[in-house]
Image (cartoon, rainbow, N blue to C red):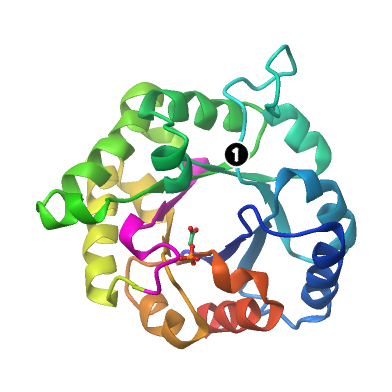
Amino acid sequence: MRRKMVAGNWKMHGTGASVAELTRSLKAFDFPTNVDVAVFPPSLYIGQVVEALNGTAISVGAQNVARQAEQGPLTGEIAASQLADAGCTLALVGHSERRQVLGESDEELCLKFAAAQQVGLVPVLCVGETLAEREAGNTLGVVARQLNSIVDALGIEVFHKAVVAYEPVWAIGTGLTASPAQAQEVHAAIRAQLAAKNAEVAQNVRLLYGGSVKAANAAELFNMPDIDGGLIGGASLNADDFGAICRAAGN
Ligand code: PGA
């Protein structure tokens, strides 16, 4: 049985004061014990969040990671080893905002994925199609290409210690959610693609859905056989909303 996971991606939101308030509420929340809960604060606040959530079961991750694992001359970036040193255990790789807005390529993301794993951070690889790609019937092709760029370069075994998040770009922050059937179709295809290389890896890897997940739609998504939890943006900025989504995953 795969353990469910719910991760909150805070994106570029928060101030020292609002982060203190959010972590205080998270600390007080009674999260289900059968779900792995994680938050991804802006890197500026990682230390603050790690400290505030110390003693809870909530993991802390980074929204981005440098393409190299160790410290060095790379202005503005944060090495995977530094993130680990700060208390992170996870790192998002290839969120669509970084692919689409910041132009990160599959090749660049492959370096980041490897750098994260090199120091023991669990990469959460985000994949997903744009609306134009879906309308052109290319959804499965796009997702397969994004996944294959990692598998071909690093091997299938890297997914023993990774998570995949399927996030259709048209559903992120738009209020449009993929229907449970639409999401399940892509999750099943991802698992089948991995299973063709290694059945055990495919069986065990967690596949999260992301894109306008809310307390109201979380349960029906998480009940699908290949959806193992969620990557939550907007709704993760409110501890009660985020907590309700975690409870939906635990039921
Ligand atoms: P959303 O974002 O829940 O606000 O749609 C999800 C994400 O981008 O990870």
Q: Is residue 155 visible?
A: no
Residue highlighted by disc 1: 64
Answer left or right for 20 relative to 95.
Answer: right
* Foreground pick, 27 / 151: 27
Classify 10 Å Cα crowding around label 1: few (below 14), some (14-19), many (20 and above).
many
| Above/below status of 164 relative to 236 | above
Q: Is residue 162 magenta?
A: yes
Residue 111 appears at what percent x and percent y? 49, 23
- Residue at image position (76%, 65%) is 57
Q: Nearer the viewer, residue 201 or 120?
A: 120
Q: Residue at x 83, y 80 (%)?
A: 28
182 left or right of 161 in image: left
Residue 217: % across, % down: 41, 83
Q: How far across and how far down the image is residue 149, in percent? A: 32, 30
User: The magenta stretch spans which residues?
Assistant: 160-175
Residue 189, percent across and down? 22, 54
